[in-house]
Image: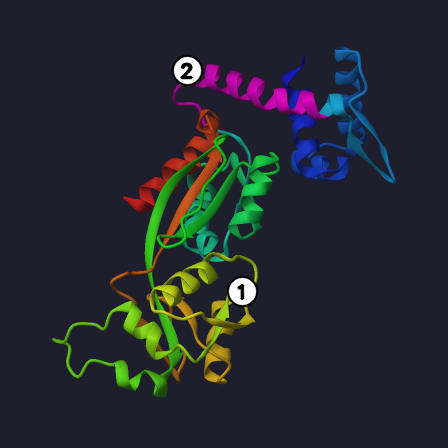
Amino acid sequence: MDPRRLELLLLLSRLGSMREVADETGLATSTVSQQISALARQVGTPLIEQQGRGVRLTSAGRRLAEHAVTILATMEAARRDLDPEGEPAGLLRVAGFTTGVRRALLPVAAELRANHPKVRLRIYEHDPPEALALLTADKIDLALTYDYNLAPATVDDALEARPLWPVSWGLAVPDGDARPLRPASDSEIDIDSLTVFRHFRDHDWIVNSRNTADEQVVRVLAAMAGHQPRIAHHADSLDLVQHLIVAGFGIGLLPVDHRVLPGVCLLPLNNPDVTLRAFAVTRRDGERWPPLALVLSLLAAQRA
């Protein structure tokens, strides 16, 4: 089987249309169609079928695309073994949460553009559950995810999670409501998390609209403080959470390094602390593919 034709089939399984494959490779759509038809003749079975105005892979086409991942990775590994200085090349699909893309992936993208132009990124914004589902379904190659120390996540045995960075989180509240909890001087010890949660037991809470991890943290700490939180609002944007706080709609968690708006006070949470932990998640042995191995190494260098 022609590896170039296998690569086109794999791109079709990932991108979903002949036109997108043609745009990605610089080929004519008719050429892509002819090459996949030739591959079907080679293997002796149809690989695509009509779906409305477009096409989709048959079950045989999907199975061959799955094999193509291993075949092309093995061929690339052999090439690298014979030419260790060879340049990685390929399209890498990444799904990640907003902060992960902004903080970690965009610097990697700049590095790739400057020094490894043959590695191309396709970026999707998704929260962890969505990103992990896409990774398991082989619709992406890398997921940037997170959990909290008080709400640890588990990943499928077929996946591998590599730690990236931790970030401490605090409780964002209206500035006036925070005054009784502020230390009189910098030398005083911060009030512990359970005392903070007891102080705000009668407030409404604002939690994430797309992921339940921070809500789990809120419920755990509230239970430890002896009450049940009143979840009133859901917002994905951290800036929107702050605007809701200023408008008097409730309180919510924010990373301690996040810029706060006037009228918002960010109280530290200690004993127990609240820590967001970011991860790079791949399918097991995925790092054998040179473009993915390169991106993982660049992400690890940021952590170091």
Which numbered tag is attached to residue 236?
1
Apparent side of residue 37 relative to residue 116 in the rendered image (left or right): right
Apparent side of residue 302 relative to residue 156 in the rendered image (left or right): left
Q: Above or below — where is 137 with respect to 203?
A: above
Q: Residue at x 36, y 85 (%)?
A: 177
Q: In the displayed image of the protein, which residue is found farthest to the left?
A: 187
Q: Does the segment drawn in magenta span residue 80?
A: yes
Which amino acid lies under the numbered mark 1 shown in the image of this protein?
Asp
Q: Does the segment drawn in magenta span residue 17?
A: no
Q: Is residue 111 visible?
A: no
Span highlighted in magenta in the image: 62-87
Residue 140 in the image, given as x and y percentages of width and height: 58, 38
Q: Quadrant of the N terminus?
A: top right
Q: According to the image, label 2 marks what residue?
A: 81
Residue 203 in the image, given as x and y percentages of width and height: 44, 79
SS at mark 1 in the image: loop
Label 2 packing within 10 angstroms: few (<14), some (14-19), many (20+): few
